[in-house]
Structures are given as C-alpha cells and as structure tokens.
Image: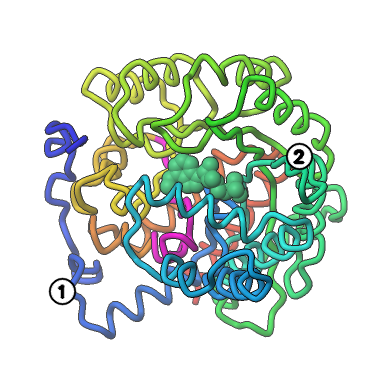
Amino acid sequence: ARQNQSYKARRAPGRRRSKTKPAAMGTHTSEAEKEMREWCVALPKVELHAHLNGSVRNSTLLELAKELGDKGVIVFEDVKDVIMKNDRSLPECFRLFDLFHILTTDHDTVTRIAKEVVGDFAAENVVYLEIRTTPKNNEAKGMTKRSYMNAVVKGLKSVEDVDVVLFDSNLRNDEKLSCTPMTDLGDDTKRKRIYVRLLLSIDCRETTSAALDTVNLAMEMKDQGVIGIDLSGNPVVGEWETYLPALEHAKELGIPTTIHCGEVPNRKEIQAMLDFCPQRLGHVCCLDDEEWKKLKSSVIPVEICLTSNVMTGGTPSLELHHFADLYNTKHPLSICTDDSGLFSTSLSNEYYLAASTFGLSKTELFRLAQGAVEFVFADDEVKKSLRAVFERAAAERLTS
Ligand SMILES: CNc1ncnc2c1ncn2[C@@H]1O[C@H](COP(=O)(O)O)[C@@H](O)[C@H]1O
Ligand SMILES: [Zn+2]
C-alpha cells in the first residue's frame, strides 16, 4: 500500500536475453539454475550492507534459545516457532530483532556470532565484508558499547579456517595483491581470505547523546577495523533531528556514513537524508518522483537488498524492484543481503535473483560485483587489493 505507482515505470524495459542468460524465475531448467547458482557462489563478492544480528544462522539462534529456555528465561517452543516462521513483515522484523538481542546479548555470544557470520560470508566467496552492528549498553550483563564492540572484534580475530584481514598493515605487498583465483574458489581445500571492516549502527530509537557516543566510539576504534557509521532501526520510529547531530559529528570527524533511507514513505525524512549527502544509502524503496530525481543526480551509491525489500513490503515484487531502473540508468549500486539469517538468503542468492529476475548475463553480474569495490569505505590500499582480486578472477575466467 505504501508503494507509489510510479514504480511501474521504473521497471527494466524488456532486456534482451541471449541463450546463455537465465530465464525468468520459475522457468529455469534445474540444470541451468544449478549451474548459475554455483557460478554465483564462485563469483568473488563484496558485501556492504549486512547487520550482524540479522546475519546469524537459524541453527545458532535455536541453540541459544534452547539454552535460555533451559534456564527458564524464555519459553523455547514459542521462540522456536518465531525463529522458523518465514513471514517477515517490517514490524515483525523489529519484534524479532528484540528477541534476537535477548538471545545474543552477552559478550561470549556476541564473539561467537561475529566469528560465525564472517565464516559464513567467507564460505560463499565474499572477499570484502562490511559488517554493521549497533553497540549496546546492557547493565545487567555488565556490557557497555565499548565492551560489546570489543567482543565483536574478538570474534573477528578468532576466525580460524579463513584469513581475516582486519587491518591492512599485517599484509606484505605481494600478499596484498594475491587472491584466490575464481576457478579455485569452489575448492574448499584452499584457504580463503576476506577483508572485514566494521560499521557502527545508530539505532533510531536512541537518544542524541547515545548516538553521539556511538560516533565517538567509532573514532576510538578506528585502528580496530571500524570505518563508518550506519543509521538503521525501525523506520517508523524516531526523528531525524534526534540523530542528525551525531551524523554531523561523524561528518566533521571524517567518518563515512551510510543511511537506511525510504524503507517506508516519509517525505520529510527522505529529503533530509538526501540533503545530508551520506557516502552511501541503503534501500531507497519508497521515493517519490522528485526524490528519485534528486537521488539520481546525487550519484550516491545505493545498497540494494532485493529479498529484504520484498519481504518487508518496500517493493511490491522482485520484478518491480527499483534495482532495474537504477541499474539501467547506471546509478552506482551494489547488491547486498541486509539480514541473511532473518531473510534466509545469502549474497550469492541475491546475485542469482538479480540475474534470474532482470536477465543479467554472467559478465554483467561480474561487473556488478566488481563495481562494488569502488564504494567500500576502506582505504585506497584495500581498494587496490580488491581490484586486483577481480582482475585476477576475470583473467582466470577468460583463460579457463
Ligand atoms: C529489515 N530492514 C532493516 N531496516 C532497518 N534497520 C534494520 C533492518 N535490518 C536490521 N536492522 C537493524 O539492525 C539491528 C540488528 O543488528 P545489530 O543488533 O545492529 O547487529 C536491528 O535491531 C535494526 O536496528
Ligand atoms: Zn539494513
């Protein structure tokens, strides 16, 4: 209902399909679909929009729920049904996050989920990951925003079966340029490498002072992989004026920002967000024609979250998703998961959906994945290494 009609005009004008292009969803032969899905897994990918607590595996959530159930803190059977349910409307997502936070908010668990989430992204050949999370104060657990983040960093450092590059300085020059060739990516015996950086999220439920604390914490943790600020949370809660001082403060400190924008229609807020000119924007679902024009002329890169937007009703269907218009007009964008656990998806699956829904070829998908390198918040050294990763992968593909 919150969708405006002009979306229909934004649909991809019937893109030509060559024989090698996947057909629309549902009409794949299973072999072609399987091959394309595997190709999407093997593709090196850059993930720019993933929330830590939204990316936790269901099996972990169930295990945590069982433990709390045994302690009598929650009723396991009720929580289990909620975790396994597939319906994820926008209000339901935020009720679920409150539940997830009950399950995950203690230091050891935060460390565990951070470790697992990075491992899961690396397993599907994500070569650069910006993971965002909301630092939390929780007196009962003796948790401060700082100790929460220390627990996250501990998790990133404890990943064992993958090389996690949290700081660039621990790589030699020749190592920086090395990468896993695409043909080897499916080979699990080779050690994978993933660059990981952190964004600190301001939850729009927070006060100005709490939001400022988060920005100051980001500054303090600059040498520990924290490179940006995100504004997220339930889009029907909070006022722009509350978090603006913190976003301005980030800007003054030179910390890049990315903002959840237009998950629901909100004229005033969307205008203000576009005027703020963050380094990236998430979602941009419910923009009216004027805001759409403004976005396009701003050339602010957009983090596209297909499944998330369909599930939460930000877009009426995958086919009508605004990805098509942004892609066709060459607006900078990158494909992201948002909450791979919550929405039972993966970055490979999101690429597959882009291909199968909008008729993108493998070359187009590759360019899309490669293009995301230019929008990372990490420094030029990391960008250089990532460009090399994609160049190597492209060369491998052409010669193999
Ligand atoms: C579905 N679309 C969305 N829109 C807005 N905010 C979202 C979101 N998905 C996740 N979050 C934000 O991320 C938090 C969970 O991860 P962390 O506890 O920070 O790791 C949620 O509580 C919400 O604030
Ligand atoms: Zn998000």
Residue 315 image-quadrant placement: top left
Mark yes or no: residue 181 visible.
no
Q: Secondary structure at mark 2?
A: helix
In the visual, does 86 lie left or right of 396? left
Mark yes or no: residue 35 visible.
yes
Q: Which of the two discs, 1 and 2, labels the residue nearer the N terminus? A: 1
Residue 3 sits above or below residue 251 on the image = below
Q: Mark 2: which amino acid?
A: Lys
* The disc label shown at residue 27, or none: 1
* The disc label shown at residue 348, or none: none
Question: Residue drawn 40% across and 45% down?
Answer: 304
Q: Mark 1: which amino acid?
A: Thr
Q: Is residue 62 magenta?
A: no
In the visual, does 39 lie left or right of 317? right
- Give the spatial CA distance, label 1 vs label 2: 48 Å
Residue 194 sits above or below residue 60 on the image = above
Instruction: Identify residue for label 2.
Output: 145
Q: Which portion, as a residue range, is magenta?
A: 332-350
Residue 290 sits above or below residue 173 on the image = above
